[in-house]
Amino acid sequence: GTFERWVEPAPFNWTIHSERAELQEGGGLFVAFTGVGNPLFASQIFAVSPGEYKLHTTVNGQMPENGGSLGWVLRCAHTPEVLLDSKISLRSSFTGEIFQDDLVIADNQCAFVLIELRGRAGAFPKISRVEVQSISLQKVDDLGTVR
């Protein structure tokens, strides 16, 4: 969740797909996005069970308004069907912001999820420099509490 280096091989560890993204030594993922296109920066595959989840992301940096944004795309690893398309667009510069999204994985929908961090083109492309400090996908139990 904090982008620290693990010993597991890809795709069950973070894979960096762009020279504009890098894992930070103390954790975190730095991304410099030009605001053009829909580039893939990082991805990972992990096992899931059916249920309700909350995706939490903590991000810090600078992202000019209408200059472009980032987003998480989650899909079953064996199908192109999108389970979640989450937008990360900072409102303030260099102030950590938390983004939260809900996700439901139905029974027998998928055993493995592919998560991708992608850029989203801006109306007036500008360079964004951000650090994704952490990400977590937490299961919500029947009582509505996060585990």
Image (cartoon, grey):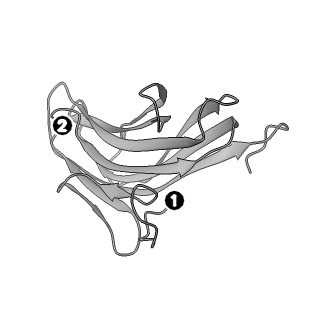
Relative height, residue 94 to residue 120 (above, below): below
**Which residue position holds label 2?**
35
In the rendered image, residue 38, in percent from the top left (x then y), is placed at 23, 34
Name the residue: 17% across, 57% down: 19
Name the residue: 67% across, 31% down: 108
Q: Nearer the viewer, mark 2 or mark 1?
A: 1
- Give residue 102's quadrant in the image: top right
In this picture, residue 49 sits left or right of residue 134: right
Q: In the displayed image of the protein, which residue is found farthest to the right?
A: 143
**Tag 1's secondary structure?**
loop
74 and 22: which is toward the camera:
74
**Tag 2's secondary structure?**
loop
Query: Mark 2–mark 1 contact, CB under 8 Å?
Result: no
Q: Amino acid at mark 2?
A: Gly
In the rendered image, residue 34, in percent from the top left (x then y), is placed at 15, 42
121 and 105: which is toward the camera:
105
The numbered dot on residue 30 is: none
In the rendered image, residue 75, in percent from the top left (x then y), is placed at 47, 34
Relative height, residue 63 to residue 129 (above, below): above
Name the residue: 41% across, 51% down: 59
How many residues crowd mark 2 within 10 Å: few (<14), some (14–19), many (20+)? many
Label count reads 2
In this picture, residue 95 sits left or right of residue 111: left
How many residues crowd mark 1 within 10 Å: few (<14), some (14–19), many (20+)? few
Q: Earlier in the sequence, mark 2 or mark 1?
A: 1
Relative height, residue 65 to residue 30 (above, below): above
In the rendered image, residue 28, in percent from the top left (x then y), is placed at 39, 63
The numbered dot on residue 1 is: 1
- Give residue 118's quadrant in the image: top left
Instruction: Give the spatial CA distance, label 2 vs label 1.
Output: 25 Å
Q: Amino acid at mark 1?
A: Gly
